[in-house]
Image: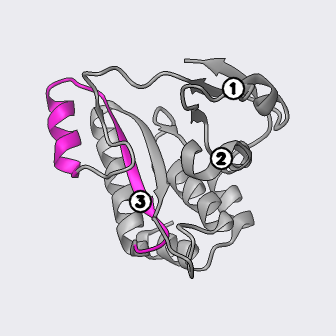
Amino acid sequence: MNRDELIGLLQTPDPLRAAELAGVGLGGVITYSRTPAPSDWVVDGETEQPLEVHRAAHAAGTPSEAAVRYGAGVPVAHTVDRLIALGELASDTGLLRAVSPVPGEGNQSRPGSWGVEDLVVIALARYVLPSSTLVRPDWVHLGSAAAQVAVAFGANDWQIPAGDTTDASWLAQAVGRRAVAR
């Protein structure tokens, strides 16, 4: 699927096509953690750092975790272009550990993202990124229920906030997965 086709899928979300594209079957593992990445890693959080920051970290042998903004206020082409660039970086260096799609802020007339949009972006991330890169739904913005559903669209990791008492094993088992702490 090329860039224009990815943009088209995100502009007119088709969750069944997105799930098919992600190639996710039943069974398998979802990793999770309740602690942040090591302090020496480059971690975007909710804000996208320039690709050059990740590239420089990787050149120095330092892993990174990247954010990809989407939804309200974020052009679809930006989201797709960033995913493609992160996929290339991950393939080139092997040091991009995780990518977390993060919805826009939104307002009263338009939420930061729509539920289907969240799932399609997860599927596109899984499609574009190498299998060694974790695809992580934004637990804080989407919540545990949407993070659980995101597994069917290619998410394979949860960053559960400290203090959140959600039972990761139960959540994973309910969607045919086994939760493994990383």
Q: Which mark is residue 19?
A: none
Q: Which residue is mark 1?
A: 165
- List x then y, in percent, for residue 113: 57, 67
Q: Which residue is mark 2?
A: 143
SS of the residue at dot 2?
A: helix
What segment carries the magenta color?
50-73
Residue type (three-letter) at the residue carrying disc 1: Thr
Residue type (three-letter) at the residue carrying disc 3: Arg
| Residue under the image location 49 percent in, 71 percent down | 106
Q: Nearer the viewer, residue 70 or 61?
A: 70
Quarter location, residue 155:
top right
Other-residue count near label 1 (Cα within 10 Å), few / some / many at <14 / 14–19 / ≥20 = few
Q: Which residue is mark 3?
A: 69
Mark nearer the N terminus (1 vs 2)? 2
Judge from the rendering whether residue 120 lies leftward or rightward of residue 46; answer left or right: right
SS of the residue at dot 1?
A: loop
| Residue under the image location 85 percent in, 35 percent down | 174
Residue type (three-letter) at the residue carrying disc 2: Gly
Mark nearer the N terminus (3 vs 1)? 3
- List x then y, in percent, for residue 146: 70, 50
